[in-house]
Image: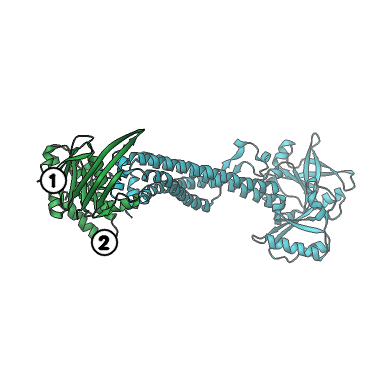
Amino acid sequence: MALLELNKVKKVYQQGKIEVPALRGVDLEVEEGEFTTIFGPSGSGKTTLLNMIGCLDTPSEGEVKLNGDEVSKLSQTELAMVRRYNIGFIFQAYNLIPVLTAYENVEFAIRLIRHIKENEIREKTSNILEDVGLIGLENRRPNELSGGEKQRVAIARALVKEPKIVLADEPTANLDSETGAEVIKIMVKMNQKLGTTFIFSTHDPQIMKYAKRLLNLKDGMISGDERR
Amino acid sequence: MFAIKLGLRNLTRQKRRNMITAMVIAYAFFAYLLMDSLMNGMEEMSFENIRDLETGNIQIVHSDYWEEREELPLENLVYLDQDVEESLKNIDGLSGISPELRFVANLNNGIDELPVLGLGIDPDRYQEVFTTGEYLVDGSMFSLGENKGVLGEKTAQLMDLKINDYITLLVRTKEDTFNTIDVVIAGIVNTTHPMVNSGTVFVPLDIAQQALNVENSVSLIAIKVNPGYEESVTETLNQNFKRKDLNLNAYSWRESAETVIALSTAKKAGIGVILFVVLLIGIIGIINNVILSALERTEEIGMMKALGMKEMEIVSVFMVEATGIGIIGGLMGCLLGAIGVGLLTKYGFDLSYAGDMTNYGIPILNKIYGVWNFSAFYFLFILGIIVALFSSIIPALWAARKDPVKAIYHR
């Protein structure tokens, strides 16, 4: 059974009286541990597809299954619980909380998971910060970190709760190519170490080369699916 | 717990705005506490003035006199016989008895005339009940049998009178014939009660009784009681009068001070309005703060939702922040209020700017002193926190219900 399954997923946005189709029937299966890139021109539906996979949005038609369970018909609260336990997010703009330190930003995500002991929270948070190379920077606030360091905090935040899938929407778009490559390398490392499934969108061909699977999205449909 | 930590940390964001909101709340609290202190001070002083300088704790009068007491009639007086004296004996908590003859008089200084309230008193017994003697600014109190009088400073100034001047009180006797009481001014008083200072002339009871031809009768008997005994003494007195078949009644000072009591009730309503305004200021401040914070943190709210935070968890972050502002504003307000009330209790508030307060029926002169009302501090502080907490819920819910996709991408 695939970890993630999308069947004929369509998404139509209403803009006034005009219906704008963002996804036109996407069929997709993603196995556990995959490192997948979605690429395509602007407006091709990459972000919409990531939102469907990440349970941030629900399809107008079709179904999304996570671990075999259909999630597209769940309520907002149920979707929040699915996201809390199963999905990690990495945003282009990092979206860190400025009043929390790097450590606290990461800790924040794991504290949402109930029934984790205090020492386990500390251990997991410290370990993941070490994995992404932030030892020594734990007590810095986001405004004291570089763009690459902020994105590493975001990666640690996404991974600390050990989700099944980590979704990243153009995670390197705000970074220079060198830093972007470093960030992707960390994602590759964590994919290999933890076996976490990564799905990220990008425009950057330099970044795409790290992907094991390339999904080409065009006009709201998958026009190419290449495995390496 | 993390929501509390994050909410408290968020207080350090937009420090200036948070401080302004807290200061607005603090100012509103401060104004309320000052007003409350002054109002309570005014009430306390008014009541003290009435009890200590006008009525005593209890007044014993003939049942038919009470309704007409404002007219100062010489009918239906209390005849001081053995039955009355016995009715007043051995009552637990009763500490002073002062018979008074109240009458209408015209004060004549040889040139001008002024209508005044004449008060025939037994000075020794009078001081058991009233504190007027403590306010003598010139001369001394008279004794029974002396043709001497005491008047208020304002009356003396108005009539250009001083110690040892002669005055004549023109009175009507019980039989409605004219008579005069000629006395030398023995003392001048300047009390905190405007009624005593202007328009009252004290003369010895026996002199007044003789001039008015009322024999051993008085208008009323003023009673002073120890604290907490007012009700029981009133009850015992009324029982004693009933047992002896005397047509007398004991009335609390509250019944003589209906106007002031009514003002006091109005004061409570006024304080309620002020409280409402104070809370409204707090509510508007908090709502404004939460809305602005939510607008500024739209992407952050989106991230929280993406991480799986439920609406109520996000709401709780904003609620903690709003409550924090409420607590800071409340503490500042209470601190400022304490300083203000402290100054008011020590130095008072000069009422002369507002004119003669007797025109408004308030028996106070010159200055009102504030009083400490600690319950107002607790009440306001706790109410402020509760209001801050609850007024943040709706804007916080509005923020937490944002579509996560729109919030993340700030669409």
Around disc 1, counting alpha carbons within 10 Å, would you say few (fewer than 14), some (14 to 19), or many (20 or more)?
some
Q: Is residue B88 visible?
A: no
Establish whether labels 1 and 2 are both on one chain.
yes
Q: Position of residue B258 (x, y in %)?
A: 70, 48
Residue A176 numbered mark, or none: none
Query: Chain A, which colour?
Result: green
What's the residue at 20%, 56% (across, down)? A124
Give whichever of B183, B218 is nearer the camera: B218
Marked residue nearer the N-terminal end (1 or 2): 2
Q: Is residue A47 left or right of residue B396?
A: left
Q: Which chain is cyan?
A: B
Q: Position of residue B44 (x, y in %)?
A: 61, 50
In the image, residue B374 sits, relative to residue B197, either above or below, namely below
Residue A117 numbered mark, or none: 2
Q: SS at mark 1?
A: strand
Do labels 1 and 2 touch, CB within 8 Å? no
Circle 1 chain: A
Q: Which residue is mark 1?
A: A213
Q: Is residue B388 left or right of residue B225?
A: left
Q: Amino acid at mark 1?
A: Arg
Circle 2 chain: A
